Image (cartoon, helix red, strand yellow):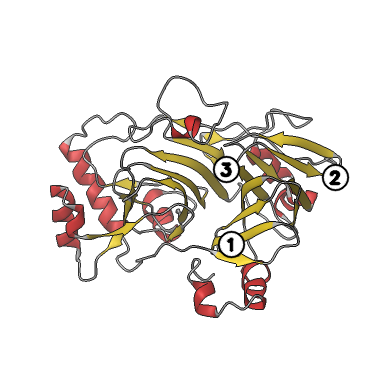
């Protein structure tokens, strides 16, 4: 079946976890956010089982993201791609309170221990953070399983975990298996593998704060320790700028084998043009912005997202604009070569993520 492709708006599951507040509605100015009520997460583009996005407008309205990927893999994802689901999950996360200390399995452990097709490496791009905000990321050198478990049972996370300062505009690439948390007073855009595997260290449920039975909590800690990787100790990065042919900026925030994230800005009157050979998720973190693709043109509201199928090939963003672009990269042609041509060394480029 031939499809006349266009930018896809999708349904966005929203989560009311206990750490959320009203930042997504009030500070991102997302008009579709319900009132009143706590919003912890909006899943901007999701192909997670039970939370699969559906197209909301145009000729493909009602189609699920998964069905489009299954039936049109190369038109959605690019030449030579194959897979049974869209590989990237993106979210806005409001950590008005601290997230639970938790981790996500890597691909190997997800298959062996969780019965899932893949694990979850993720990255956080900090949109807003209160003065003095911090994140817990990774475990201090020398901590073993017994020491970690004892600290987690006591809730003494600082005894074993690294606490890092959090600043708006920076990005942290978090390999699967890394114990972590962020918040309070932190607004984040998260990009990650399509997965919902998670092991929490907390004795309560993040959905409603209710206490877990002791046996269930102990089992969760057992699984967390089985999936924990002690070595990753990532650091926040400011991103690497690339030259642009408009009045604005392009910053590569992070890049690894599972995803890349860029932030593009364009001044009033300028037009940012982005050519692509894979699907691109466009999320608006500024004011309402005009998006143009061939014969299609529309305004993307604040705090909202669009999915650009690979078949479209190019998009134009009219300034003033401040948008995030997430995609599955070819690390050599999309990341390493242009950054090296701009004068960045291999160690600086490698700090954006991890090798394939």
Mark found first going from the N terminus, 2 or 1: 1
Seen at 72% across and 48% down, the residue is: 76
Q: Marks 2 and 1, Cα distance to the nearest angstrom?
A: 25 Å
Q: Nearer the viewer, residue 302 or 205?
A: 302
Total marks drawn?
3
Residue at numbered disc 3 = 285
Is disc 2 placed on a helix, strand or loop?
loop
Pointer 3: residues within 10 angstroms few (<14), some, or many (20+)?
A: many
Find residue 242 and report its image quarter. bottom right
Is disc 1 placed on a helix, strand or loop?
strand
Which quadrant, please, contains the N terminus? top right
Q: Nearer the viewer, residue 324 or 336?
A: 324
Which circle marks residue 252 in the picture? Answer: 1
Mark found first going from the N terminus, 3 or 2: 3
Q: Is residue 236 visible?
A: yes
Pointer 1: residues within 10 angstroms few (<14), some, or many (20+)?
A: many
Residue at numbered disc 2 = 294
Mark found first going from the N terminus, 3 or 1: 1
Q: Marks 3 and 2, Cα distance to the nearest angstrom?
A: 23 Å
Residue 58 locus on image (x, y percent): 77, 30
Seen at 49% across and 62% down, the residue is: 238
Instruction: Evaluate if marks 3 and 1 touch, with contact meaning CB atoms under 8 Å apart.
Output: no
């Amino acid at each position: 079946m031939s499809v006349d492709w266009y930018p896809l708006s999708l349904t966005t599951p929203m989560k009311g976890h206990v750490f959320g507040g009203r930042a997504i509605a009030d500070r991102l100015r997302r008009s579709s956010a319900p009132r009143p009520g706590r919003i912890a997460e909006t899943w901007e583009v999701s192909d997670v089982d039970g939370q699969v996005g559906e197209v909301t407008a145009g000729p493909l309205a009602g189609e699920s993201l998964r069905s489009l990927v299954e039936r049109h893999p190369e038109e959605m994802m690019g030449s030579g791609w194959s897979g049974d689901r869209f590989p990237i999950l993106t979210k806005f996360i409001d950590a008005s309170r601290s997230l639970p200390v938790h981790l996500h399995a890597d691909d190997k452990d997800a298959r062996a221990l969780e019965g899932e097709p893949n694990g979850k490496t993720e990255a956080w791009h900090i949109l807003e953070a209160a003065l003095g905000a911090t994140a817990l990321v990774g475990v201090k050198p020398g901590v073993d399983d017994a020491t970690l478990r004892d600290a987690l049972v006591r809730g003494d996370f600082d005894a074993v975990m690294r606490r890092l300062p959090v600043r708006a505009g920076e990005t942290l690439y978090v390999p699967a298996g890394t114990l972590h948390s962020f918040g309070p007073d932190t607004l984040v855009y998260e990009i990650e593998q399509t997965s919902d595997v998670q092991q929490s260290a907390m004795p309560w449920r993040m959905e409603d704060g209710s206490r877990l039975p002791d046996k269930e909590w102990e089992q969760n800690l057992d699984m967390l320790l089985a999936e924990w990787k002690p070595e990753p100790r990532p650091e926040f990065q400011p991103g690497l700028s690339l030259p642009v042919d408009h009045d604005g900026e392009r910053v590569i925030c992070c890049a690894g084998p599972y995803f890349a994230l860029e932030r593009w800005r364009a001044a009033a009157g300028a037009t940012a043009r982005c050519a692509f050979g894979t699907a691109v998720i466009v999320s608006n973190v500024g004011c309402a912005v005009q998006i143009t693709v061939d014969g299609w043109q529309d305004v993307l509201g604040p705090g909202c997202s669009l999915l650009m199928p690979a078949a479209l090939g190019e998009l134009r963003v009219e300034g003033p604009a401040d948008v995030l672009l997430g995609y599955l990269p070819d690390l050599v042609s999309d990341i390493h070569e242009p950054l090296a041509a701009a004068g960045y060394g291999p160690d600086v480029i490698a700090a954006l993520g991890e090798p394939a």
